[in-house]
Image (tube, coloured by chain):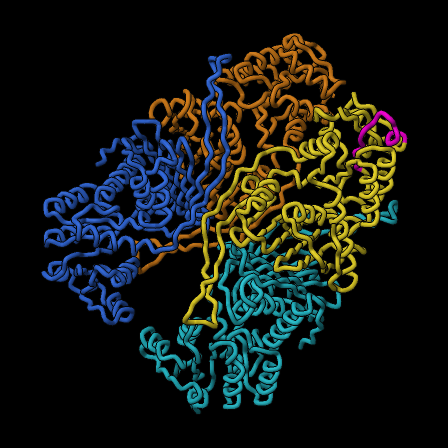
Chain colours: A cyan, B yellow, C orange, D blue
Amino acid sequence: MIRVAVVGFGYWGPNLVRNAIANDDLELVVVADIDKDKLSRCNRLYPSVPTSIDIEEVITEKSIDAIIIATPVHTHFNLCKLSLEAGKHVLVEKPFASSSIECLELVTLAEAKNLTIMVDHTFLYSPAVQVIKEKIQSGEIGKLTYFDSTRINLGLFQNDVNVIWDLAPHDLSILFAITQKIPCRVLANGKSHEGEQENIAYMTLQYDDDFIAHFHFSWISPVKVRRTFIGGNQKMIVYDDVEPTEKVKIYDSNYKVLESKEQQKEKLYEYRIGDIHVPKIRNSEPLAAVMRDFSHSIRNRSEPVSNSKIGLNVIKVIEAAQVSIELGGAAVEVDLL
Amino acid sequence: MIRVAVVGFGYWGPNLVRNAIANDDLELVVVADIDKDKLSRCNRLYPSVPTSIDIEEVITEKSIDAIIIATPVHTHFNLCKLSLEAGKHVLVEKPFASSSIECLELVTLAEAKNLTIMVDHTFLYSPAVQVIKEKIQSGEIGKLTYFDSTRINLGLFQNDVNVIWDLAPHDLSILFAITQKIPCRVLANGKSHEGEQENIAYMTLQYDDDFIAHFHFSWISPVKVRRTFIGGNQKMIVYDDVEPTEKVKIYDSNYKVLESKEQQKEKLYEYRIGDIHVPKIRNSEPLAAVMRDFSHSIRNRSEPVSNSKIGLNVIKVIEAAQVSIELGGAAVEVDLL
Amino acid sequence: MIRVAVVGFGYWGPNLVRNAIANDDLELVVVADIDKDKLSRCNRLYPSVPTSIDIEEVITEKSIDAIIIATPVHTHFNLCKLSLEAGKHVLVEKPFASSSIECLELVTLAEAKNLTIMVDHTFLYSPAVQVIKEKIQSGEIGKLTYFDSTRINLGLFQNDVNVIWDLAPHDLSILFAITQKIPCRVLANGKSHEGEQENIAYMTLQYDDDFIAHFHFSWISPVKVRRTFIGGNQKMIVYDDVEPTEKVKIYDSNYKVLESKEQQKEKLYEYRIGDIHVPKIRNSEPLAAVMRDFSHSIRNRSEPVSNSKIGLNVIKVIEAAQVSIELGGAAVEVDLL
Amino acid sequence: MIRVAVVGFGYWGPNLVRNAIANDDLELVVVADIDKDKLSRCNRLYPSVPTSIDIEEVITEKSIDAIIIATPVHTHFNLCKLSLEAGKHVLVEKPFASSSIECLELVTLAEAKNLTIMVDHTFLYSPAVQVIKEKIQSGEIGKLTYFDSTRINLGLFQNDVNVIWDLAPHDLSILFAITQKIPCRVLANGKSHEGEQENIAYMTLQYDDDFIAHFHFSWISPVKVRRTFIGGNQKMIVYDDVEPTEKVKIYDSNYKVLESKEQQKEKLYEYRIGDIHVPKIRNSEPLAAVMRDFSHSIRNRSEPVSNSKIGLNVIKVIEAAQVSIELGGAAVEVDLL
């Protein structure tokens, strides 16, 4: 059994605790938080799990193998670093850290110490994203042409981060997990209508080929939309996360160029509207798969699906987007791993 | 009766002919086209309407008051100019002309000659857009915060123009008609996956306040979407042109800032999810209203709703978008009327 | 070429004329109607087609091979009979005639004279219904368990017939065409809220096995629904005729019985929620296929898809439904062909 | 404080326990069940709540004021009777009991002892149903013309009851709560495709005026539908319980009769398609309101919304429906309270 501690019992911590307990490879030995009230809540919900108010003590405790961190973002770097230095494997909530430079230091440290550091991009373990990934990797979709994601709602305004920091980690991690493509430039526009933080933003990723990725984020939409279009030159995918039963639709639709002798100057296009296939999506909890991948990665010294490279690349793109907004939408180069 | 000629009997011409005939203020005296086959088709459909293969003769014919032009875009400038010089009022298909410089010359000429030149942005006369315009102008929506439009489909690729030239005139004319706001910069990204012309593009309009407008155009989407979100600080509108019966929904949803003494550093936001109102949209043909506005404008020497200023501004933005795409997405200043 | 006359140029007649003209096997020689205004309209729309105000003369005209009848229902019997007696093949609008006894006489007469009499149940020729029929006949759906159809709208009240006479011919003809099953009893309930005619009605068809068919018809629904569920013991079909692009969905969903030794008294059921397949539905005009089937049937002395047996069975069920409503919903035996 | 016991800790019991604890007027003194495992589960979830395996002892315990019963249906009668005889108020899960005769005995006993007996038709306390009820009672909808409910799914087959017993209590209780109308006859058809119990059924309620109610229940539908249409002569309501945000839509649509002198024999109808109003539905737990109504009813000796009369009428209709199915769909008289 891998002995783990969960650090942070706020919004997401209880889900991690529940799934850590349910995982047969993990033994949850302690839950730590600096807030007594949160520990009391943990005691009520899980009377048998010990709690501690001393996070540092927990992290450095010899008998513990791995630390699961679900604290506010600005604390990620210090807690991850402390954990790695103490020789612990780490699973940390998304976003990875507050800056790419922090992420890079953690990635480097983890490599030097041969430890797993994994970011909890939960969506990568959702059955819908896994089906999409399989379809793309099998070649069924063909060469990818675009990725277009809309994640909007009348949402929870945050004071400390803008809508890109809040929502982009979901879509960027999905983009990186299902394509093998590396963007080279980021362009973003956004506006804040209350306070300082942008509550609506658009982001484009440019690539060095004809692929393009675009994102629409908003906290001020009257309706909730979580929809991604993925174009390929064979088929196209619509992933609608709000749909209860038909989350992923695969369209056997496309176009092809007809070469015509008579009209040599003109290309003719033929449209193919074909069948639609709606694969059954299993009903399983993504976070349970996160835990399995974490323990598997520790046991086998293997790379998890939601690896630190994706975590770092997500932060690099978000940083670039923020610079782009400040520059009035100008293209900002990114150098991803 | 205003005596009119229709020039061009291709894709859209028959609709103009039908509506010109039906309009009580207009007398359709001739349909002109350089293509005999198209004139034969006109003869079959409307045996009583004279036809002519000599466009120039028709335009300069003394007894004719107004010319309705539905020819390919690259001919708009010459035919409009000829018509204005001959002292005729003009209704020309969108887009206005091939460049803003052409549009400006036509606008100047029409003013000098005190003639109406009107662009057939048909959407401005659709009952749905008129309802939206009324709601905004009445103040019900409050101060506008954003305009977000998606117009995508597995569409008719064109060889001579890109997806922005094809689709943006619809959304830009709507934007200009329902808001009184003037954008100052245009940013666009696009990709072509076959041929030279972009088949997917994103465009942002920046304003000198906190309003933002964004557009998504595509010919390579597996599903047809024609949806516009319009945010206000009182209410929000969703305009879904694909919906058969519920095209316009007005959401009494919003947020407000709660000032809290105790947490002086933090703003608190309260979300209001309210009723939705789906106004009945009349079922009337927009093109009939275009004809009425054209004849009314001629009779009363008044500005039509779809005036040449909107037509020119649409072209200015499209030109800027094309420059922006060529510059890799950089912001391009626009100086609209 | 089969020489045909169209009798009746009211609501549906123009569509029949247009499709008769377009059919290469048919030569439309005359359009007849007792209403001069309707004939004038025909002259305007189709100047080259002769018209006649003397229906009887047209029907008995020697050189004509077939009569297409689109007059009010109460005239169907006399005009069909006259046509058959004159040795003409007949295509008659649905519903076949005003009573089953009339239908039976026409069927018998046509058989005796070896003439085609075909009822224009246009829906049977719609691409969607044809796909459904193929799926069922191939065995893919398995043994049919139920047919459930809802056809409701805020509709055109009629003074002379109730909502069952108005709407049931569509659904009943589809039912008869896609299943080979014969119902044995009809039960119906309905209410009229204005005038004498029921504007809402429910109809059940009982069979001598475990199949059941049910119909909901209404002119007083706030929304338009045209949806049919077809259950099979392998797969299930949803046919939604209001859907623009996804009219037919085939659900690979079902259940099976698990026999359990331990709980001998209880059956256990396992649910299978599987993939959904949305076949592409061709975009073709059903009425063109009606014409092709009519001419093919005449040429080859073969039974058309929408044969007189279906036409008669539809009327038998509607008659029984009306009796059932009058009897307060009691089961009424039907003896279908 | 009203001292209550919850009897039965199976599927629904935990929800009752949670809501009883949360209610300020109720003091949950014990949870009883004959199944040790269920009590252990209760101990884990609510360590502070005493449990007992002796249901009879709990029911007859002097210090307890009210019993909440969530045991299998066939035990309802005995446990309710025991409770009433012991002078306790009762809240019992729906359906009320296994037969109307049992219900009637319980109603009579409760009246004689001046005790509350309330059936947990939870739906009556859902914010959506309350909005609908208000709209009808305010007169906004006008005179009711029909109630049409569809509750279908690929559902949990049950061995001991058919689909009507399983699903009809929801829709019948809603019908009785929102209308003041009493049906006089019940007609039903159903089929079983596995085992003995009908898995698909249709039910019609006849009234002595022009109102009609109809129900479609199924466990063998490929899609989940929970939709009720309610017609009025002023407005119409669509209640779609599957919709996440737009559960209730009020259509300002209708028709009126135009009296025409010229066509004295014909009535002319004018259709009015008007605005749609989607009222905001509060997000509150219906079961909390059930508990409040139960305690309020006990304190004030008043009739709860979900009173025993509705509970009894529901059972009377279901019994009649079952008889009707056995009689092949014949009308069965009902004599409701």
Asked whether B66 falls inside the magenta stretch, the response is yes
| Residue depicted at 38% across the width and 29% down the height | C189
Q: Nearer the viewer, residue C137 or A123?
A: A123
Residues drawn in magenta: B57-70
Quarter the N terminus of chain C occupies: top right
Horizontal placement of D180 versus C129: left or right? left
Residue D230: percent from left, percent from top: 39, 37
Query: Compared with residue B329, is residue C154 higher up or lower down, i.e. above or below?
Result: above
Across and down, in percent, residue C212 comes to 42, 37
- Left/right placement of residue B223 relative to residue C317 reads right
Residue in the foreground of this view, choosing between C7 and B134: B134
Residue at 70%, 31% in the rendered image: B296
| C208 over D89 or under it: above or below | above
Horizontal and vertical percent position of residue A169: 57, 69
Image quarter for residue D5? bottom left
Query: How far from the left and from the top, in percent, is residue B236?
Result: 54, 51
Q: Is residue D9 visible?
A: no
Between C70 and D291, the one lying in front of the other is D291
| Residue at 74% across, 64% down | B330
Quadrant of the rendered image containing residue D208: top left
Q: Is residue A148 visible?
A: yes
